[in-house]
Amino acid sequence: MNGTHLHSVKFRAMGSPCELIIHTSQDAGPELLQLARDRLTQLEQKYSRYRPDSITTRINAAAGTGETVPIDQETLGLLHYADSLHTQSKGLFDITSGVLRRAWDFRSARLPEPKSIEALLPSIGWRRVTWSQAGISLPTPGMELDFGGFVKEYAADQVAQRLRDSGVEHGLVNLGGDIVVIGPQPDGQPWRVGIRHPRQADTALLKLPMTHGAIATSGDYERFMLIDGVRYCHLLNPFTGFPVHSPFASATVIADQCLIAGSFSSLTMLTAETDPDWITRVGLPYLLIDQSMQVLSNMESR
């Protein structure tokens, strides 16, 4: 409408399928999409634990050496946010718990040996990390930081902001299901965002209309294995080293920022075993699907 054209691109980044959709002029579309992807690439290069030149790798390589690794303001902001999540979850959201992946291989269909988990637990503990504006230091060898629990959601916000700053008023950013909506569609209609059925891949249990804001879902189906009828998922308790057994199969949260929507959906899953009412006290729109596939939501007014 009004001379705008649909432009979209699908690609992989941060280990996930991604899609950018914008409505803008015919000539500007490809350039704007590339600007957005450039910002995403920048963040992936900066925080990926797989890259030898990332800040994450530099921090982890210095673990136990006593070295304080310098950090910039963006990284400091993310550490402050991780600290807040750690407090709100009573320690269940811990960005030092990524070391547990050394024991858990969800493709193996085999439980790890208890000794392998016990050996990793001393390497976990956000409160033992020393950090400030000057830098960050991990106290023991083998300890690691992993920004993977929320950096993709942060990236979705950053990509959307770059598009807004470039004049985009109608668009959608989808980074592996972490979604930011930039205004309604050009005809004023909302975007319809599907909520995946936790037990049927590629099936939407329902669709939510959205004209703005962000939405993210965390579930026990993302990485898991079934052993003797018990589901073991990738959401790990940093105190025990074992998966949480949430009464919810998935948790969806809507917020102004994808960073909040994504991390709060994860916190809902992590805390549900001990505090199933946590998300109801937060005050954000949520949609929970329990293990019997019943929907619990406060979104009736949307």
Image (cartoon, helix red, strand yellow):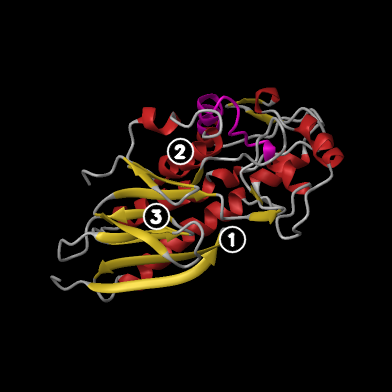
Q: Quadrant location of residue 97? A: top right
Q: CA distance from mark 3 to mark 2?
A: 14 Å
Is the C-beta separation of discs 3 and 2 under 8 Å? no
| 134 or 49, nearer to the observer | 49
Q: CA distance from mark 1 to mark 2?
A: 21 Å
Q: CA distance from mark 1 to mark 3?
A: 16 Å
Q: Which residue is mark 3?
A: 179
Q: Which residue is mark 2?
A: 264
For marks 1 and 3, the one nearer the N-term is 1
Q: Which residue is mark 1?
A: 15
Q: Furthest residue to the right?
A: 115
169 to the left or right of 163: left
Amino acid carrying mark 1 in the image:
Gly
| 114 or 36, nearer to the observer | 114
Verify whether residue 228 appears in magenta. no
Q: Is residue 135 visible?
A: yes
Q: Report x, y in % for residue 289.
A: 43, 48
Q: Residues within 10 Å of mark 2 (few under 14, many from 20)?
A: many
At horizontal 50% and vertical 34% (from top left) the residue drawn is 77
Q: Residues within 10 Å of mark 3 (few under 14, many from 20)?
A: many
At horizontal 45% and vertical 57% (from top left) the residue drawn is 177
Name the mark on residue 31. Answer: none
| 44 or 239, nearer to the observer | 239
Q: Report x, y in % for residue 138.
A: 73, 31
* In the depicted structure, whether residue 74 falls above or below residue 212: above
Amino acid carrying mark 3 in the image:
Ile
For marks 1 and 2, the one nearer the N-term is 1
Span colored in magenta = 80-97
Q: Report x, y in % for residue 66.
A: 79, 27
Q: Residues within 10 Å of mark 1 (few under 14, many from 20)?
A: few
